[in-house]
Amino acid sequence: MSRRITITVGQRQGEIVGSDHLTLQAAVDYVARLGGGTVVIGPGTWEMGNSLFLRTGVNLRGHGDDTILRKCASESTRLVDDIDWYGTSVEVEDASIFRVGGGILLRGKSPHFDKQQFVKRTVVAIDGNTVHIDRDPRENFWTETEAEAATLFPVVAGEEVSDLTIESLCIDGNRANNEELNGNYGGGIFMQDCNRITIRDVTTRDNNSDGVSWQVCDDVTIEECRSLNNANLGLHPGSGSQRPVVRGNVIVGCDIGFFFCWGVRDGIVEQNVIEDSGRFGVSIGHRDTDNIVRDNVIRRSGEHGVLFREHPEPRRDPHRNVIEGNVIEDSGTEGECIAIEMKGSADGVVLRENTIVDRRSASSDRRRIGLRIGERVGRLTLEGNEFRGLEQDVFDLRPSPARAAE
């Protein structure tokens, strides 16, 4: 279809006028009802008391960093009665922190298993200290596990949606005024079971979570975006995500810049700048196979520029990945400062034409190592890598026969 509806949303003028998540959601849902199109969000700071829920075929377009979707401050309160998996009402100590149409997170330890539970819902009514939610939680939250309800949620969220683009927005997580929400459940943008999503020219900043997290999502493209000062992961392709393309982004000041979760395959991560990561610039591990990481600049990672994680079972390690053409600078802060740390038994990995350099002056507090190869690492191809300014270029812990077999 060559022509589809476009709706403008503004704080002072537009086809829909307002200043919060309710206004934006009204526009998205209206366009979805007409079969898809584009919602253009005007300049200004939009106060997000709940997620903006994506819909299939509905594109979002802002005015760059002049369009700011800013999360409200988070608050939490204890449950004073149980809610079972089929219930739709939550009795809390203080319902005043919630609003109708706002987001609510139920969290607490499972009364049946040794695990934490997190369920995101929307408030549809409030009666005294009873908060009614839009859907049953499908988990039990009981008072003896000190269950809580909080105003925590992703700023933009998609579940089982496809074929849409998000571009030219700024998503502000208001980190100083929000508790942490694990990136498996939240982030500036959080998507679950989605397909064919493009995120372009979007800033995600100051989230007490991930910048962008996509779980079990195929064919997601992230390009020319900025992930800045997010507490956990800058960009996070989650478990089972196939064929991500992550190109031309800037990731600064996150705990881990780019994190391959479980079973991420056939991805391309290229031409990104990843700086000042608290721990790792790039982390790759459990069943993350057949990915290409190339032509990136990775600077000043707190521990390692690139980490190959390990699993006790070799078949679950990150095999057949290619790391090529990257510049990895000034990795680690003290002790053994290792640019590329290969743990586990990764097999069939190629490290080609990377420049690994440490420009800092020598220090008794650190020993600068370009590449450390763990004793269980399998076949490894090393071609044309350049090492500069290091005490040791390559530290190979494998037995001699394994090295000779390559």
Image (spheres, rainbow, N blue to C red):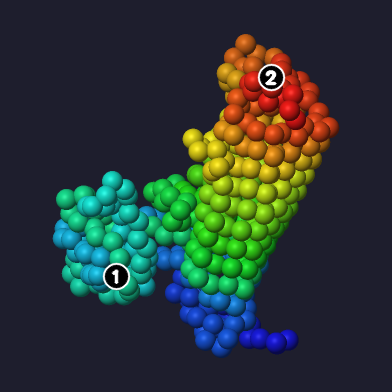
Q: Quadrant of the C terminus?
A: top right
**Extreme-right residue of the structure:** 384
Locate residue 184 relative to residue 135 in the image: left or right: right
Task: Indicate the quadrant where residue 201 lies.
Answer: bottom right
- Secondary structure of residue under mark 1: loop
Instruction: Identify which residue, 267 or 279, lies in the foreground.
Output: 267
- Secondary structure of residue under mark 2: helix
The residue sitting at 70% across, 52% down in the picture is 268
Asked whether residue 275 is in view, the answer is no
The residue sitting at 32% across, 72% down in the picture is 135
376 is higher (above) or lower (below) than 153: above
Instruction: Identify which residue, 254 or 326, lies in the foreground.
Output: 326
Locate residue 83 relative to residue 240 in the image: left or right: left
Task: Tell me, for residue 400, which label it has, or none.
Answer: 2
Instruction: Indicate the position of residue 13 as horizontal and vertical percent values.
Output: 58, 79
Q: Local crowd at mark 2 within 10 Å, few (<14), some, or many (≥20)?
A: few
Task: Indicate the quadrant where residue 246 lies.
Answer: bottom right
Locate residue 5 relative to residue 70 in the image: left or right: right
**Which amino acid lies under the numbered mark 1 shown in the image of this protein?**
Asp
Instruction: Identify which residue, 59 or 380, lies in the foreground.
Output: 380
**Extreme-top residue of the structure:** 364
Tell which tag, 1 or 2, sits nearer the viewer. 2
Task: Give the residue at mark 1.
Answer: 136
**Which amino acid lies under the numbered mark 2 shown in the image of this protein?**
Ser
Instruction: Indicate the position of residue 405 as horizontal and vertical percent values.
Output: 73, 28
Q: Quadrant of the N terminus?
A: bottom right
